[in-house]
Image (tube, coloured by chain):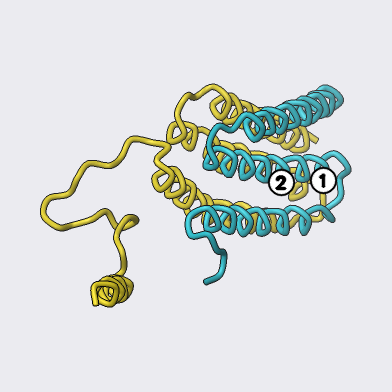
Amino acid sequence: MTYEIVTLYAVTFCLVVGMIFTLVGAIGLLKFNDSMTRLHAPTKVGTVGVGALLLASIIYNGVLGEGAIHELLIMAFLFVTAPISANFIAKVNMHRSNCDAPPELPGDDQWATFDIPAVDRVEELDASTKSEI
Amino acid sequence: MTLATDLMNYALMGAFVIVGLCQIMAMIRVVIGPNTGDRILALDTMVVNAIGLVVLMGLAQGTRIYFEVSLIIAMLGFVSTVAYARFVLRGDIIE
């Protein structure tokens, strides 16, 4: 009996944590004033927010239901994919000049995302020499 | 027992309201923009919020059938975010 009550309180705690972090992420997404700054707020939703909601589901079903930890799969998937999509969105911001340009590198070095691969560079050279001829 | 059950039901209702509100706030960011990056980010956030809503629905109804739904939404959301970002970056999704 007491153990069910403890479970219900734990589920309540997880739900409250999840909804607070989801709200914080949404407010940050609306209120921040720069594209790259806005990128930072919704990461809280993807990790702690949904993570706490899934944890609530795991605890509730694990103690009062038949008990399974399938939700860990969703959590792991979100944790693995969040940095990749954030990287892509940051690249979109950089390439469309929606943020400050990164500082110049010494010598002929280029930032990896702005660099042309060696294969394409040779093709570009060929095209320019052809046009000269 | 009844107090704990009531508390959990209130927390569940509050979580529904708050996550729905967050969905609307992300939708506002999709509409006002101003850049493509912001729109992609807001759509990604909406997918994550949708997963949260589906999980809450499963918790409220006490069933486990919503697990597959949220897993598929998570996978589709990641793929669509990457596809959209790649389309904006390269003008093509699969080269």
Which secondary structure, mark 1?
helix
Figure label count: 2
What x and y, as percent, mark residue A34? 45, 29
Above or below, B12 against A90 in this view is above
- Tell me which chain appears yellow: A
First-in-chain label (1 vs 2): 2
Q: Same chain for labels 1 and 2? Say yes or no.
A: yes
Residue B16 picture quarter: top right
Q: Which residue is mark 2?
A: B51
Q: CA distance from mark 1 to mark 2?
A: 11 Å
> Mark 1: which amino acid?
Gly
Q: Nearer the viewer, residue B52 or A117?
A: A117
The 10 Å Cα crowd at callout 2, few under 14, some 14 to 19, many 20 or more, is many
The 10 Å Cα crowd at callout 1, few under 14, some 14 to 19, many 20 or more, is some
* Quarter placement of the N terminus of chain A: top right
Q: Nearer the viewer, residue A52 or A28?
A: A28
Q: Nearer the viewer, residue A24 or A87?
A: A87
Q: Nearer the viewer, residue B93 or A50?
A: B93
What x and y, as percent, mark residue A117? 31, 69
Chain letter of mark 1 equals B
Q: Which residue is mark 1?
A: B58
Q: Extreme front residue here?
A: A133
- Please name the residue shown 29% across and 73% down the image: A131
What x and y, as percent, mark residue B20? 76, 31
Q: Which circle, 1 or 2, is nearer the viewer?
A: 2
- Please name the residue shown 47% across and 35% down the image: A40
- Please name the residue shown 77% across and 48% down the image: A61
- Tell me which chain appears cyan: B
